[in-house]
Image: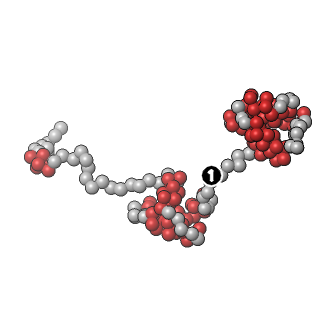
Amino acid sequence: MPAKYEISQEQKAEIEQARKKNQHKRIELKLKVPSLRAEGKSLKEISEITDYNSMYVSKIISKFIHKGLSYFTENHYGGNRRNMTYEQETVILAPYLEKAEKGQIVSVAEIAAAYQNAVNHAVSPTQIYAVLKRRGWRKAMPRRRFPQKAREEAIETEQPLPKNLP
């Protein structure tokens, strides 16, 4: 027989405090489930109110009992899969920044080689581009010619300016 979890009034007060501080809709709905359970509602009633399946409502209540309120309030989703910290990236990119400030050409292949040596595994150029974008770097190349420049014939036929202008 499955366990029937009861939520105390102290836990309910703690949930209500967390709901007041919360700004995320999904977390709010998940916090509403144990709050309704503390009021004495059944799984079926809670599932009708929240539009969750009754089995999912049961899982939410179980996680609240076993893992506590912090399980809902903390963000436990992945994301930042960077190989190194911002400061470590700064150290690696410093020589290339100096080179770029002097007007020399800096290639992604050079930066990728240094980055690979630092992390000890292969790194794709797209990852290096992401690092450079995060730093505000952009690809700047000189134009071959000014797009609004007059044609050569127009330049040759143009009259020179008089030298005694007021």
Rendered position, 157 above or below 29: below
Q: Residue at x 72, y 36 (%)?
A: 53
- Which picture quadrant has residue 109? bottom left
Residue 68 visible in rendering = no
Q: Amino acid at mark 1?
A: Gly
Rendered position, 48 above or below 112: above
- Which picture quadrant has residue 49? top right
Number of on-image labels = 1
Residue 102: percent from the left, percent from the top?
A: 42, 62
Q: Residue at x 53, y 68 (%)?
A: 122
Q: Which residue is mark 1?
A: 79
Q: Decide which of 21, 160 is in the foreground and name it.
A: 21
Would residue 95 be found to the left or right of residue 6 on screen?
left
Residue 96: percent from the left, percent from the top?
A: 48, 64
Residue closest to the far front: 1
Q: Decide which of 154, 123 is in the foreground and name it.
A: 123
Q: Residues within 10 Å of mark 1 (few under 14, many from 20)?
A: few
Q: Decide which of 157, 56 is in the foreground and name it.
A: 56
- Which picture quadrant has residue 74? top right
Residue 47 visible in rendering = yes
Q: Residue at x 57, y 69 (%)?
A: 121
Label 1 element class: loop
